[in-house]
């Protein structure tokens, strides 16, 4: 069996599309289609089902990908680093939320730089963007707030983050704790809101978990970066829902006040995601293990 055909097959399996695989391989789409048909004739079995948008692997295709991909990745590592190259002398492409990658993932991975690893990052607000890029081979590892489905990607729970409803002291001083406990959603819906998107994803998740309702307010300030949401809330622009790790320092020095302390605080889980089989590559496995160890203290 031709290794070039296998490499093309694994790329199509990961990309979910002949067109995307062709772009990744530097080939034309007809060339990729021809190679897959050749491999299917050699095996005597179909490997993909053609859909209107992309392809779906058959059970035979999934089995072949899961068996072949780790070995192909290992061969790529040998050709890129050489037989006597340092294990860590590779580039790791990481994707994920801008705040989490900047404040947690990158500092945790920094010790690996002394082993020869270099880092390249792609920052996305939506988990789907990180996972799509990972599946297409543009990234090696992704941090995501959604667990991917199917066997193409492998996800490991990384950590949970607690969400806190906060505001600057001047807003908090206007809110009586007993009133918030009794009719919190109604009172808070009258205040300005700082969020990352018009749909108020953080506020809506908090309202659903704590008040079992939907927020009635609209965003007063909408900015697609939680660090900017933090600074806007500190400046008094309005209330916000933030991860505790991000606003902990502002809470400690009084720049922000936690408006509520619910018995069960809303949580969001982060997942560490790789393409299935790529943990056979030493630089990805090392980064994966490093992040899991660091997350034990987050």
Image (cartoon, helix red, strand yellow):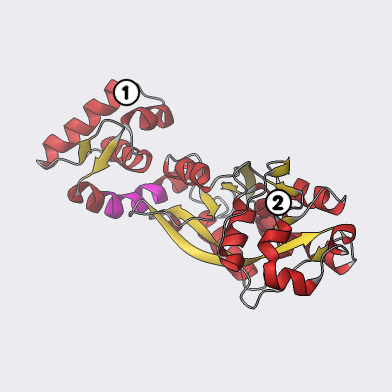
**Can residue 256 be found in the magenta stretch?**
no
| Local crowd size for mark 1, using a 10 Å CA cut-off: few (<14), some (14–19), many (≥20) | some
Residue at horizontal 69 percent and vertical 72 percent from the top: 182
Left or right? Give the position of 235 relative to 211: right
The answer to which quarter of the image holds residue 181 is bottom right
Q: Give the labeled residue for mark 2.
A: 102
Residue 77 in percent (x, y) is at 46, 47
Quarter placement of the N terminus: top left
Q: Nearer the viewer, residue 298 or 274?
A: 298
Residue at horizontal 33 percent and vertical 54 percent from the top: 150
Residue range corresponding to the magenta coloring: 65-74
What kind of element bears circle 2?
Answer: helix
Q: Give the labeled residue for mark 1.
A: 29
Q: Nearer the viewer, residue 27 or 241?
A: 241
Question: From where the camera sits, is residue 6 visible?
Answer: yes
> With respect to residue 149, does 46 lie above or below?
above
| Local crowd size for mark 2, using a 10 Å CA cut-off: few (<14), some (14–19), many (≥20) | some
Q: Are marks 2 and 1 in contact (CB under 8 Å)?
A: no
Residue at horizontal 23 percent and vertical 53 percent from the top: 63
Residue 207 in percent (x, y) is at 61, 61
Quarter placement of the C terminus: bottom right
| First along the sequence among labels 2 and 1 | 1
Most frequent secondary structure within the magenta stretch: helix
Residue 139 in percent (x, y) is at 51, 44
**Can residue 68 be found in the magenta stretch?**
yes
What kind of element bears circle 1?
Answer: helix
Residue 129 in percent (x, y) is at 51, 41
């Amino acid at each position: 069996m031709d290794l070039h055909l296998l490499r093309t097959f694994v790329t199509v399996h990961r990309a979910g599309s002949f067109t995307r695989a062709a772009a990744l391989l530097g080939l034309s789409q007809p060339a990729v289609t021809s190679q897959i048909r050749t491999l299917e004739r050699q095996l005597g079995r179909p490997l993909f089902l053609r859909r209107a948008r992309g392809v779906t692997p058959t059970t035979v295709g999934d089995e072949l990908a899961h068996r072949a991909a780790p070995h192909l990745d290992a061969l790529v590592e040998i050709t890129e680093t050489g037989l006597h190259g340092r294990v860590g002398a590779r580039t790791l492409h990481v994707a994920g939320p801008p705040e989490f990658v900047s404040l947690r993932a990158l500092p945790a991975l920094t010790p690996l730089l002394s082993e020869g690893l270099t880092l390249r990052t792609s920052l996305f607000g939506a988990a789907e963007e990180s996972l799509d890029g990972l599946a297409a081979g543009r990234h090696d590892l992704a941090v995501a707030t959604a667990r991917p489905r199917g066997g193409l990607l492998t996800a490991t729970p990384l950590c949970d983050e607690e969400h806190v409803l906060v505001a600057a002291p001047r807003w908090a001083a206007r809110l009586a704790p007993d009133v918030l406990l009794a009719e919190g959603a109604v009172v808070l819906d009258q205040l300005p809101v700082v969020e990352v998107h018009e749909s108020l994803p953080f506020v809506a998740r908090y309202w659903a978990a704590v008040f079992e309702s939907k927020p009635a307010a609209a965003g007063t300030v909408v900015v697609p970066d939680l660090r900017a949401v933090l600074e806007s809330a500190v400046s008094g622009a309005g209330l916000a829902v933030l991860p505790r790790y991000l606003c902990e320092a502002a809470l400690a020095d009084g720049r922000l006040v936690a408006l509520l302390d619910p018995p069960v605080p809303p949580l969001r889980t982060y997942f560490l995601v790789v393409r299935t089989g790529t943990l056979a590559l030493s630089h990805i496995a090392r980064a994966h293990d490093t992040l899991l160890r660091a997350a034990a203290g987050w």
